[in-house]
Image (spheres, helix red, strand yellow):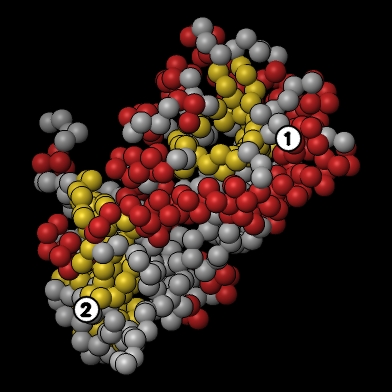
Amino acid sequence: MPETATAPAWAIPGYLEAREGRLFIDGADSAALARDFETPLFVFSERRVRSNVERLKAAARGVNHPVRFFYASKANSTMGLLSVIRDAGIDCEVNSGGELFKALRAGFRPDQIIFNGTSKTGREIDEAVGAGIYSINADSVYEIELIEARARALGKRARVALRLVPEIGTRSHLGLQTALMTSKFGITSSEVLDAFRRALRSPEHLHVTGIHIHVGSQTPDVEPFAAAFKTMWEHLKTIHGESGHALEHINLGGGIPVNYLRDRSQADELPEGEREMLGAELEPTEVLAAALQAARDSARDASAEHLLEGVTILLEPGRSVIADAGVLLTTVRNIKRRPETGDVWLLTDAGFNLLLSMTTYKWYYHVVSATRADAAADEPYKVAGPLCDSGDVYFDIERGGRLPDYRKLPPGVRPGELLALLNTGAYTIAQMFPYNGRPLPAVVLVREGGRPELIRRRDTYEDLLASEVW
């Protein structure tokens, strides 16, 4: 019998595969997608999104405790994807009036929506209170008073939770850590009890439902989640003991990581801390189990098991739902050779205006040849985008060692070859912008059976003028 070729390290059976020498995305030929929809092009797998949601729901079933998941729409609020996530059976977290508008338009019920954010406007609060959403997470004592005033003016009662910043660090990027005192988010531990007392003074306009901590994105360890849950649980017990008020939920936020380093061929070129963070494989079951164990230990000590039974755990996953379901296809448009350095430069049509994290956080997205997906990738290239900006490169121009100096691809890459950046579903489309007057790309969703469906058309030049007045 002929030998079966070894699948590339980046492959995910049934989703990302090398067939006939080309990259297939959930059964769709990437070369055909690029031909039919042009590049740059974002491609998503509906089946992968649903599989990621099912992984979360299975984790909840495994802990035998009420759990709800609210998808963090800031990761990607494309309407076609919001609809898939809604149909998959989880809820939605928003951070602005615009995201609230999109969530409601996508079919999420008001009682399926949480509203976060540090600088909510009066109009946004009015929209959230008027819609009757599940919870507005208050970020300060001032915001508690603002929500109360808006609810009074509307003659309504707002459901609120308080966001806490408890000084819990993680091994993620500093800019992604949101439970530190250096973070702009939340109410400190020393003021949170007074904040609850303030909120509980106005039961006719404020219904205090829960407490919230988000330790940060791409958290590789379970300990910060357990510490955060224990902190919130202790406050819940104190509030109940003082006022008799029982909170309905404890919100652990998001942060469940995605493994960006399934293919570790260039992992050794990253610093150890970056490798551990980018290659994290923490399971949601571990997060939930550790959080509940921390609370149960405390509950037994204080005979507070009955309080724990009445508390629903909320999680706000974003990256873990959508990141590895998305691929960015880009075409090599130009090639340069530098005789002085020996470098070969590949100039693509996908710049940092589509991959902002590659600049802000020096984020690593693995690059493969979609045209020669099963070929050995051992040739070093300097890869860069099309923007008139020296920072528009796929490596660390500052030479800080946070990204590989070169990307490895098959030998002999030429203009016209199709490349794919993997794990690009989160914090890309949501942050992209038309720098240099470049129209934003199309987005395709691969449905069951490998059927591609356009869920965002490619912008035209006319779209560049859509909001301008002259």
Disc 1, SS: helix
Sequence order check, earlier mark of 2 and 1: 2
Crowd class of label 2 (few under 14; some 14 to 19; many from 20; radius 10 Å): few
Q: Is residue 10 left or right of residue 352?
A: right
Front-most of 341 and 463? 463
Front-most of 1 and 138? 1
Residue behind mark 1? 309
Front-most of 100 and 186? 100
Crowd class of label 1 (few under 14; some 14 to 19; many from 20; radius 10 Å): few
Image marks 2 and 1: residues in contact by CB distance under 8 Å: no
Q: Is residue 331 visible?
A: no
Q: Position of residue 193 (x, y in %)?
A: 75, 29
Q: Is residue 290 left or right of residue 276?
A: right
Residue behind mark 2? 20
Front-most of 260 and 291? 291
User: Looking at the picture, does residue 139 appear above or below residue 150?
Assistant: below
Q: Position of residue 176 (x, y in %)?
A: 53, 53
Give the amino acid at mark 2.
Answer: Glu
User: Looking at the picture, does residue 308 appear above or below residue 391?
Assistant: above
Q: Position of residue 373 (x, y in %)?
A: 27, 78
Q: Residue at x 25, y 57 (%)?
A: 449
Specify the quadrant of the image occupied by residue 300.
top right
Image quadrant holding the C terminus, namely top left
Q: Is residue 221 left or right of residue 460?
A: right
Q: Residue at x 59, y 47 (%)?
A: 60
Image quadrant holding the N terminus, namely bottom left
Q: Position of residue 262 (x, y in %)?
A: 45, 72
Number of disc labels = 2
